[in-house]
Image: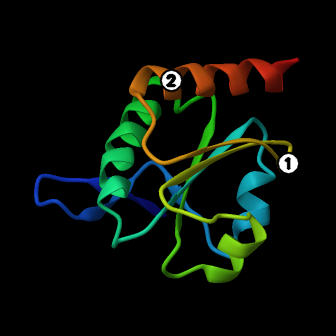
Amino acid sequence: MSHPSARDDGKLKARMGIKTVTGYNFEHEIGKSGPSMVFAWGSWSSSSKTVAELIDSVEENFGEQINILTLDANQESDLVTHLGIKKVPELIFMIEGEVVDKIVGVPEKIDLFEKVHEIIVAESL
């Protein structure tokens, strides 16, 4: 599967490496071992492009330690409701399928990296 990624043309484009979740595969993907981060985005949201760039950096630095998943809020309204997403972009951090934290909007890169590291450490305890 692919995920949205910011590209020079200003659009979110598919890229290999990060999985896209849907109502169909969500439970399977978050059930994999290790912590998960779900990136809920919308094509209408310019902030989603900015966060997509950050997600690429998270993948490069932590991709082996955390499951990185993306959710197209345009296409998956039932899953958006299930996860309590009110605004995109939103990052949802999960351990063993349970939501443990969220970031709404565009975080600073250092803050996002610190949160990802915190979730990875918490999952290993």
Residue furthest to the left in view is: 9
Give residue 52's position: percent from left, percent from top.
37, 49
Q: Is residue 24 visible?
A: no
Is label 1 in a helix, a strand or a loop? strand
Sooner in the amino-acid sequence: mark 2 or mark 1: 1
Image point (66%, 71%), residue name: 80
Name the residue carrying label 1.
98
Image point (59%, 79%), residue name: 76
- CA distance separating discs 2 and 1: 21 Å
Give the residue type at disc 2. Asp
Mark 2 or 1, closer to the camera: 2
Is label 2 in a helix, a strand or a loop? helix
Give the residue type at disc 1. Glu
Give residue 122's position: percent from left, percent from top.
80, 22
Q: Quadrant of residue 95?
A: top right
Image quadrant in which the C terminus is located:
top right
Q: Is residue 124 above or below residue 94?
A: above
Nearer to the camera, 54 or 1 = 54
Give residue 14's position: percent from left, percent from top.
33, 63
